[in-house]
Amino acid sequence: MTSWWFPSLLALLFAAPLQAAGPTLAGTVLDETGTPLAGVAVTVNGTETRSDEAGRYRAAVDEATVYTLDFNADGHFPAVHSFSPLELSWWAEGAISRLPPVTLVARAEGRVMMTFGGDAMMGRRFSEPYPGDPVLIRPGHRAADTRALLSHMAPYLQMADLASVNLESQVMDAAPEVKAPKSFVFYTPPEAVAAFRDAGVDYVTLVNNYSNDSLKSGL
């Protein structure tokens, strides 16, 4: 008997798995008056497209855990929007996820883009997580790990003319020996300061309810 099918079966069994088909993202870009913007460069996880005369764009991308869209147009401030697969499912119409409209603000004299972040720190569960959770800031790798933590926020911070966050802790090289008499005290390693700067943070506020966590030594 001729086993002509055998090599074909082996080829099928050992073939590299195909990458799962990703979603198709679609939406519109508007100006401040609600008028469609044509020719806007839209990049979705590295895939580039442009909006048409009606401000519409569409991009088919590979499957991912986060979908980040960058919007750039001459004479306008840029914009970045990120979505999870769950969020895309909320707006799915068949194979297409129709995202909410994006409004780009026109550049004009006296206008600047400012980004304000809330409480930020690199302590507690980053280095001492709950059982089963990963250690996000490892001993001996604090510089690299703090930068990695901020890499997802860097696009939002770097496009601003001024970016500011509230540094909700004191900056200390090691866990403080003296602590304020309160339930929770925080501290941030000094490597995080460089990570905030490199991610695009221009200014941090220090006066908050954790400023005195380590008392005089922390100050």
Image (tube, rainbow, N blue to C red):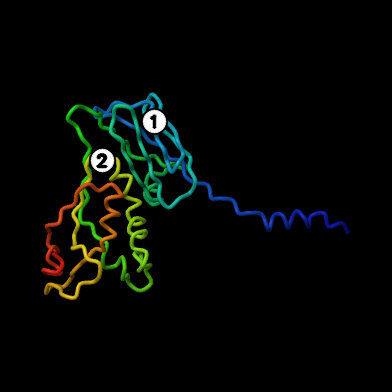
Within 10 Å of disc 2 (Cα), the crowding (few <14, some 14-19, many 20+) is many
Question: Is residue 10 or residue 152 the one in the foreground?
Answer: 152
Q: Residue at x 32, y 72 (%)?
A: 130
Q: Position of residue 183 (x, y in %)?
A: 16, 73
Q: Please, is residue 13 above or below residue 60 in the view?
A: below
Judged from the image, the secondary structure of the residue bearing numbered disc 2 is loop
Within 10 Å of disc 1 (Cα), the crowding (few <14, some 14-19, many 20+) is some
Q: Please, is residue 23 above or below residue 140 in the view?
A: above
Of the 4 image quadrants, the one containing the C terminus is bottom left
Q: Residue at x 20, y 67 (%)?
A: 186
In the drawing, what numbered circle is on residue 200? Answer: none
Label 2 is placed on what type of residue? Ala
Question: Is residue 105 or residue 122 the one in the foreground?
Answer: 122
Q: Please, is residue 40 above or below residue 209 in the view?
A: above
Question: Is residue 43 or residue 23 the one in the foreground?
Answer: 43
Of the 4 image quadrants, the one containing the N terminus is bottom right
Q: Position of residue 62 (x, y in %)?
A: 49, 46
Residue 20 lies left or right of residue 173; in this view the side is: right
Residue 40 lies left or right of residue 95; in this view the side is: left
Q: Position of residue 102 (x, y in %)?
A: 31, 36
Q: Position of residue 153 (x, y in %)?
A: 31, 50
Place residue 15 in its image quadrant: bottom right
Q: Looking at the image, tell me whether mark 2 or mark 1 is earlier in sequence order.
A: 1
Q: How many marks on residues?
A: 2
Place residue 156 in its image quadrant: top left
Q: Residue at x 20, y 51 (%)?
A: 165
Q: Which residue is mark 1?
A: 56
In the drawing, what numbered circle is on residue 160? Answer: 2
Label 1 is placed on what type of residue? Arg
Question: Is residue 200 or residue 119 the one in the foreground?
Answer: 200
